[in-house]
Image (tube, rainbow, N blue to C red):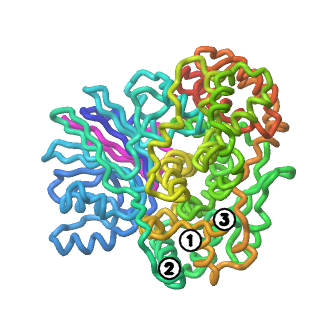
Amino acid sequence: MCGICGFNNDDKALVKKMCDLIIHRGPDDEGYFTNSEVSIGMRRLSIIDLNTGHQPQHNENEEIWIVFNGEIYNFKELNHQLEKKGHKFYTKSDTETIIHAYEEWGEDCVKKLRGQFAFCIYDSIKHVLFIARDHMGLKPLYYYFDGLNFLFGSEIKCLFSHNIKRELDLNAFNLYLSLNYIPFNTTLFKGIYKLPASSYLIFDLKNRDLKIKKYWDIKFNISNTKPINVLIRELKDLIEDSVKFRLISDVPLGAFLSGGIDSSAIVAIMSKIMNEPVKTFSIGFEEGAPINETKYSRFVADYYNTNHTEIIVKSTCYDILPDLIWHLDDLISDPAIIPVHLMAKYAKEKMTVALTGDGADEVFAGYSVYYRTHKYPIFKYFPQRIYDFIMNFYNHIPSNFLRIALAYQYQSKTEEDRFLRTLFIVPDIEKRRVIPFKSEEIKPLIQQTFSKNLDIINQYIQWDLKYQLPNQYNMKVDKMSMAASFEARVPFLDTNIINWAATIPSELKLNNNIEKYILRLAMKDILPPKILKRKKLGFGTPVNLWFNTGLKEISGEILERLEKRTYLINSDYVKKLRQKRFKRIVENRVWNLIIFELWYETFIEKQRIATVEL
């Protein structure tokens, strides 16, 4: 794993400055290439080919150069194909594989790669930068282009080395308030964009022309009618193959273990393949937390005789928030950032790479929202005209309880409405009470992404896989692990598994309210019944407990500062949340605002810079 960056002119000192800001992504090595057209650089976390893996790397005649962040798990197979076609390799790294794949297959090279990646190829013959991001958006890539200057980087903060203006994008802020993250290609910074997952960008250095193309998409084609026993065998083989590929490493490797079905399945397969006990790490919370899965992770660790380490997170951990916000320049409001980072930080003492169970819930319908949306059918019989009439006066209703009840019913008329309701932290109907500026409704933006030819369950899965996963959950894991110079690998998000899952009917994913049904069947001979029959609990970070203990005073102070930003948010809304922040019903909204205020102070006002001076 690495951090990469670059721009379209010659300045080695400046590209080095960019790299210095992402040194946590690659503390082991650094490298640069500059000429009259470009400057590209990288910081390296050495995992594969420790001796000859230095970057940037080049082809035989040094006409094509690359900086690369990620891992290509099928690089040895690709190397055999490329060698037969006459390509010669001077390293044993997966980085060089991409160069020769680009020479051989051009832009289609990305379709050959199996792994997680963000890379930039400089083609001095065509005078272009070819920049690509992996299929599921496991690795981040940001860019800025003002018509003259083109900049890119693994993290937004390194782009600020160029003294570009830092300005809040109000449309993105509107999305953030609704969803806790930004699901599309914008960021909270005006003019700075994400390269979407499964896409590549070509920048013409001569004409200063930029174009983006999608090279892969999840295609739901429910055509797999094989007997259930055949499907179970296929899925089991796919998962075992995915885990096996992700065990390639020249440094110590292990797993993050929650004790749920997904991470336990990964540990079970690793135990089957590896010759030594698997190193496992799990995290728990202090006494009083509503959810604590440590008894299950201990059970799994004992069952498979792993080398297990358990970390307990306490409410006093809030003091690391400024550092974590600095790493979350593309802001995500998810309290799990704290335990994920701490687990990576402590795991780093024993290993550099961990496999995780992330992604299985999105692929196999593992969230309770998928089946809970079928409840409350009474709402669909309530006359639409009465709803519409009442909603005209919604913002003038004095009772907060009545407003919440009406909003809940208004968002519960159809299955799609009920699913969307679960996505929103602040629904569209409340926005006028929250922000002082005119904002676009979020619901229609999300509805535009739905494929009406899909059943309702696969519609939900499609949203989660294409928008929520790459922009929230994958970025949480990437940024919080890389902040500790640590790599996470995600077997369930292998494209072979995703493509296969898109061909089976939704009843095999969610069957009579049994989530991940086909996965449970596939793991029946691998996992003990105690784990196999567990219902999903989720990674329940105890925010409400923290607000009543370690974060009690500081959360109020942060909200008071935000309350004064009346050009961004209505002070009455913040004031009421500040008074009610100890109640579980508002904890997500409160956390959303606290994290935003710290982000705003850090990056827009530059008052609270952590770790490295920007």
For disc 3, the marked residue is: 257
Mark-to-mark CA distance, 2 and 3: 26 Å
How far apart, in angstroms, are the residues tagged by discs 2 and 1?
10 Å
In the image, 207: left or right of 373? left
Q: Position of residue 114 (x, y in %)?
A: 38, 64
Q: Quadrant of residue 430?
A: top right
Q: In front: 418, or 170? A: 418
The percent coordinates of residue 569 (x first, y second) are 63, 20
Q: Residues within 10 Å of mark 1 (few under 14, many from 20)?
A: many
- The x, y position of residue 498, in whole percent, is 46, 65
Residue at the (51%, 54%) spot, across then down:
459
Q: Which residue occupies 35% across, 32% down?
A: 144
Q: Which residue is mark 2?
A: 231
- The residue that mark 1 highlights is 508
The three-letter amino acid code for the residue at tag 2 is: Leu
Q: Is residue 570 above or below residue 459?
A: above
Q: Which amino acid lies under the numbered mark 1 shown in the image of this protein?
A: Leu
Answer whether residue 49 is visible to the viewer in this image.
no
- Disc 3 residue type? Leu
> Which stretch appears magenta?
20-45
Looking at the image, is mark 1 or mark 3 earlier in the sequence?
Answer: 3
Q: Is residue 173 above or below residue 308?
A: above
The answer to which quarter of the image holds residue 398 is: top right
Work out whether mark 2 precedes mark 3 in sequence or the reverse, and give the earlier one.
2
Crowding at dot 2, Cα within 10 Å, few <14 / some 14-19 / many 20+, comes out as some
